[in-house]
Image (spheres, rainbow, N blue to C red):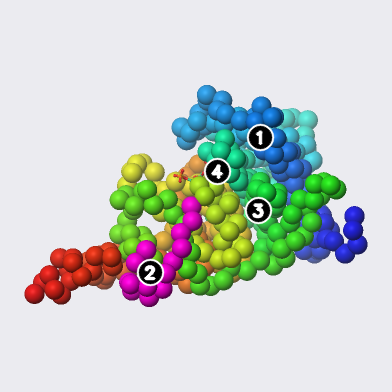
Amino acid sequence: MQQGRTTISKFLIEQLRGAEDQADLAALLIDVTAAVKSIASMTAKGALGGFLGSLGTENVQGETQKKLDVLSNDAMIQACEWGGLVAGMASEEMDDPYTLPKEFERGPYLLVFDPLDGSSNIDVNVSVGTIFSVLRHTKIGDPATADYLRPGVEQVAAGYAIYGPATMMVLTVGKGTHGFTLDREIGNFILTHPDLKIPEDTSEFAINASNERFWEPPVQRYVAECKAGKTGDRGRDFNMRWIASMVADVHRILMRGGIFMYPKDTKDLSKPGRLRLMYEANPIGFIVEQAGGAASTGRARIMSVPPTSLHQRVPVMLGSKNEIERLERYHREYDSGEDKPFVSPLFKDRSLYSDDARA
Ligand SMILES: O=P(O)(O)OC[C@H]1O[C@](O)(COP(=O)(O)O)[C@@H](O)[C@@H]1O
Ligand SMILES: [Mg+2]
Ligand SMILES: [Mg+2]
């Protein structure tokens, strides 16, 4: 290894010095990096690996599973089940929590993960990722589902890997958010982006605009104002991006600011959002907050939402603080009936609500 480079293990030992069960937590995170390396190698092989395509099975949320969803899930389990560091694991791809085989010692942590985030992108060779969250398990014996249902504020660590042109891991143990890049020649993650900070202001937003007609009015108001740019209330132009891999959108936000929204919509009233609280919103929320950003449902801090089920969905708005605060204000004004009837700034002069129209 070259002199002066900080490996992920060295970094973790330093960050966790003095913390409870520090060696165990560092060891668990290193096990996660082993899974990430094997997922990175599968995704990098693309069509040559025979890993692309669907399996023809569905996960608990009724989504068709890709081969790589299941292989990535297996990679996480294999890397983390044997070391005596976790008491159990739960994932997007498993209906119920995973119970460790009898022969493995139980450890002090619960690991919750989305093994492959953005997997609809895998067949088109666009960046995907893995998201994980670590909670403490204090009880004796194998955890029940209820033991996993803890709010995001109780996470002791969280992170994601992004399988892009470079494979990176971004993580937090509650002392800032830090990024590591996989050096494939030595097979190790090297600290390349210490202490990431999301700027408080931004002119870039990410949302799947095809759902616009299903959004609530505060989100419609926010996006319409961004789209109106210089000609509207915001007085400046905004840029929009949507990768459809949350990790990739969030990674951009950590690198240069911005906000990401997957709000509640009325497309399917049984779902209060698209993203899952336990293994998408909470870990990413922790990372974003530790980088100085904010993560909200529009009405509450994501990490304060009490989980009621393992695969619970939640509205997500996160990134540059001042924009998230604005979105929360729009929700408050809407809920209290304080805001004026929403009119797209694009049509202000011609709308029924404009002074001209009323005259
Ligand atoms: O296809 P849509 O509706 O734009 O949703 C995209 C969102 O869904 C997700 O792909 C959900 O994650 P999974 O791929 O793990 O199910 C996010 O990564 C992404 O932001
Ligand atoms: Mg996901
Ligand atoms: Mg997934």
Q: In the displayed orientation, state which residue is furthest to the top.
A: 56
Taking the spot 41% from the left edge, 61% from the top edge, the residue there is 298
Q: Is mark 2 within 8 Å of ligand 1?
A: no
Q: Is residue 13 visible?
A: no
1 or 4: tag closer to the N-terminus? 1
Q: Amino acid at mark 2?
A: Gly
Sequence-wise, the earlier of marks 2 and 3 is: 3
Figure check: 245 above or below 254:
above
Specify which label sits upstream in the sequence, 3 or 4.
Answer: 4
Q: Is residue 232 located in the magenta-colored stretch of the structure? A: yes
For label 2, the crowd category at 10 Å Cα-Cα, with few meaning under 14, some 14 to 19 and many 20 or more, is some
Crowding near pointer 1: few (<14 within 10 Å), some, many (20+)? some
Disc sitting over residue 229 in the figure = 2
Residue occupied by mark 4: 118
Q: How many marks?
A: 4
Cβ–Cβ below 8 Å for labels 2 and 4? no
- Residue 94 location (% of width, % of height): 57, 34
User: Measured from the top left, where is residue 311 in percent x and y?
Assistant: 50, 41
The numbered mark at residue 46 is: 1
Q: Pointers 1 and 3 in contact (CB under 8 A)?
A: no
Bounds of the magenta segment: 227-242
**Is residue 263 rendered to the left or right of residue 278?**
left
Q: Nearer the viewer, mark 2 or mark 3?
A: 2
Q: CA distance from mark 3 to mark 4?
A: 16 Å
Identity of the residue drawn at 80% across and 46% down: 184
Q: Amino acid at mark 3?
A: Gly
Residue at numbered disc 3:
159
